[in-house]
């Protein structure tokens, strides 16, 4: 596949016209964002995927969204997901008390008794944090998911090549200056309430592309190149309103959740409109389980198109602010952890109005 100079991103082909990649389904864009060799520099394979769409002019245009200076954090507390699925490790937070030279876990804190010890003489604390990057607000990076049928990751990497390749890690996002663009919220929770649609976020409740476009039209959002699509489904809201027993039943031991319905239409729309990434408050962005293994969005977005997926973002305060402002687009920044080889990361995301 011929590469596209980053100065000419506007010349990207439509989804239906993407050239074939041998052995992969249609819609695979490997090589499209690679840097070709010159007389003085070798060719370079791409590690950013659709984030290449975020050129300086996109950031400048997005800055026009800042009118009030009001900012909203989109980061759900790392400690919130106390019942993660798939045997993943939940947050472990330890405090280091240098005054007494002791370590105190978050679970021990309420019963801890402070006593003088052989410390360093200063009144000071550190803390140590350990967690699985899938257990809370996150970006799924391009190292997270390989194509389910071929096992190949974005730009053709084999599973056994990924960790030693120096490619696709979260540090590449840091190297390009993070993520700075316009975001827009498609608030399905509010839409469902207005239209008397009842559903449980802990069920296979698909949100179609036609519904998303209806919400966009109702919100008077004109989608443009470089935007990040945020979909509010009510998943984190449900989590915070239910007991530990219910969370364990429907999440730790669950297998069906609300999300965007996969299919050619939504994949084609995301590519042709120039969306740079997607995110939402649900556990997987796409509905689970997918209707068809051929249209699993993790395959099409992460491994085939190189499009990051944000999951379990906190969109509750954002939805309220959008209602106050009566606009559903905003300046969006995200600075993932700068960890070499990182697979995923908390988004450290802000919406600014």
Image (cartoon, rainbow, N blue to C red):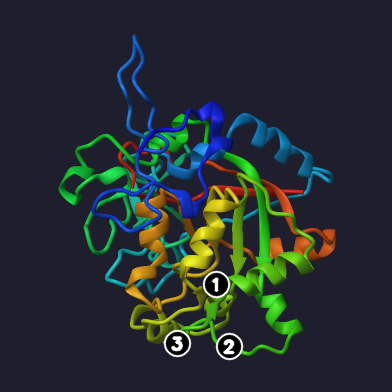
Q: Secondary structure at mark 1?
A: helix
**Residue pictured at 63% horizontal, 45% vertical:** 225
At label 1, counting other C-alpha atoms closer than 10 Å, the crowd grade (few under 14, some 14-19, many 20 or more) is: many
Horizontally, residue 132 falls left or right of residue 209, namely left
Q: Residue 96 placed where, x, y %?
A: 38, 46
Answer whether labels 1 and 2 touch (C-beta < 8 Å): no
Q: Secondary structure at mark 2?
A: loop
At label 2, counting other C-alpha atoms closer than 10 Å, the crowd grade (few under 14, some 14-19, many 20 or more) is: some
- State which mark lies toward you, 3 or 1: 1
Q: Does 145 appear above or below 64?
A: below
Give the farthest residue toward the top: 40
Mark seen at residue 246: 3
- Mark 2 vs 3, N-terminal side: 2
Horizontally, residue 60 falls left or right of residue 147, namely right
**Residue pictured at 50% horizontal, 78% vertical:** 258
**Residue pictured at 35% horizontal, 60% vertical:** 299
At label 3, counting other C-alpha atoms closer than 10 Å, the crowd grade (few under 14, some 14-19, many 20 or more) is: some
Q: Does 118 appear above or below 25?
A: above
Q: Identify residue for label 2.
A: 199
Q: Residue 63 placed where, x, y %?
A: 73, 38
Q: Identify residue for label 1.
A: 236
- Mark 1 vs 2, N-terminal side: 2
Q: Residue 85 placed where, x, y %?
A: 34, 73
Question: From mark 1 to mark 2, how far is it between C-alphas?
Answer: 14 Å
**In this rendering, does residue 91 appear at all?**
no
Q: Secondary structure at mark 3?
A: helix
């Amino acid at each position: 596949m011929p590469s596209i100079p980053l100065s000419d991103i506007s010349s990207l082909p439509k989804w239906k016209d993407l050239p074939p990649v041998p052995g992969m389904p249609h819609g695979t864009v490997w090589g499209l964002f690679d840097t070709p060799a010159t007389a003085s520099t070798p060719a370079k394979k791409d590690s950013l995927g659709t984030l290449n769409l975020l050129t300086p002019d996109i950031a400048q245009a997005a800055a026009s969204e800042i009118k009030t200076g009001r900012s909203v954090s989109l980061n759900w507390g790392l400690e919130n997901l106390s019942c993660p699925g798939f045997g993943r490790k939940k947050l472990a937070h330890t405090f280091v008390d240098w005054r007494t030279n002791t370590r105190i876990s978050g679970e021990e804190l309420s019963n801890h008794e402070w006593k003088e010890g052989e410390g360093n003489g200063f009144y000071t604390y550190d803390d140590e944090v350990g967690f699985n990057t899938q257990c809370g607000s996150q970006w799924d990076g391009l190292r997270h998911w390989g194509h389910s049928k071929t096992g190949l990751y974005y730009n053709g990497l084999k599973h056994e090549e990924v960790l030693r390749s120096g490619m696709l890690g979260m540090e590449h996002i840091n190297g390009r200056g993070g993520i700075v663009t316009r975001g827009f919220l498609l608030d399905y929770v509010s839409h469902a309430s207005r239209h008397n649609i009842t559903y449980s976020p802990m069920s296979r409740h698909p949100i179609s592309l036609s519904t998303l476009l209806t919400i966009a039209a109702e919100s008077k959002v004109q989608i443009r190149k470089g935007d990040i699509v945020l979909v509010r489904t009510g998943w984190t809201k449900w989590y915070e309103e239910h007991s530990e027993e219910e969370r364990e039943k429907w999440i730790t031991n669950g297998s069906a959740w609300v999300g965007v319905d996969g299919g050619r239409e939504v994949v084609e729309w995301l590519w042709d409109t120039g969306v740079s990434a997607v995110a939402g408050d649900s556990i997987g962005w796409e509905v689970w389980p997918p209707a068809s293994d051929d249209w699993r969005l993790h395959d099409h977005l992460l491994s085939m198109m190189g499009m990051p997926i944000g999951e379990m973002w906190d969109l509750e305060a954002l939805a309220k602010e959008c209602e106050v402002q009566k606009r559903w687009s905003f300046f969006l920044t995200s600075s993932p952890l700068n960890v070499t080889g990182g697979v995923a990361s908390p988004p450290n995301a802000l919406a600014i109005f």
